[in-house]
Amino acid sequence: MKITKVIAVVLFLGMFFLYLNFFSSFVMPWQKEDAIKAALSWGQLNEIPKDAAIFRLEKRGSMFTRQFIIEFKSSKPAIKNWILKSRGFRNVKPEIKNGIKTYEIHPRDSDAYGGKVEIEGNTVLINMSWS
């Protein structure tokens, strides 16, 4: 009886871990760097500014699609410099609505990657997808 309870608890914890790791929107601490690198590479974006404070990091999708949402605050000069250094912003004109600049970024060398970057003041929202 005791062994059955132990096996049941181990199976439950294993299934809970699998759910958190693969199916939830929560990004595990060991996945953080890879999630950021993937989103930036899909949008051909430069490294996030050094003074940036990431306050939202989320993943969505399944094994067939993946979406990463990164939101950070940084200084306006650092954001401007980040835009200038990022290939993904080249030849992309932002749509400005209610003070929010929205850049639709779809790299020409891949149909599977892309998304948008929204900038409002000193807050940047990166929303990149792969499918």
Image (cartoon, rainbow, N blue to C red):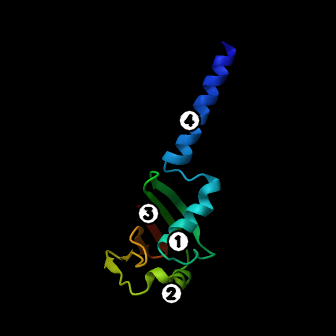
Q: Which residue is mark 4?
A: 15
- Distance between the alpha carbons at the discs numbered 2 and 3: 24 Å
Q: Is residue 59 left or right of residue 8?
A: left
Query: Which residue type carries mark 2?
Result: Leu
Residue 48 or 37: which is nearer the viewer? Answer: 37
| Mark in front: 1 vs 2 | 1
Q: Mark 2 vs mark 3: which is more N-terminal?
A: 2
Query: Which residue type carries mark 1?
Result: Leu
User: x, y (%) of residue 10?
Assistant: 64, 29
Residue 82 or 12: which is nearer the viewer? Answer: 12
Q: Which residue is mark 3?
A: 130
Disc 3 element:
strand
User: x, y (%) of residue 3?
Assistant: 68, 18
Query: Which residue type carries mark 4?
Result: Met
User: x, y (%) of residue 26?
Assistant: 53, 50
Q: Quadrant of residue 116?
A: bottom left
Give the answer, above or below, for where 1 lies relative to 34. above
- Distance between the alpha carbons at the discs numbered 3 and 1: 12 Å
Give the quarter of the figure containing the N terminus.
top right
Q: Mark 4 vs mark 1: which is more N-terminal?
A: 4
Q: Mark 4 vs mark 3: which is more N-terminal?
A: 4
Q: Mark 1 vs mark 2: which is more N-terminal?
A: 1
Q: Which residue is mark 2?
A: 84
Q: Which residue is mark 1?
A: 40
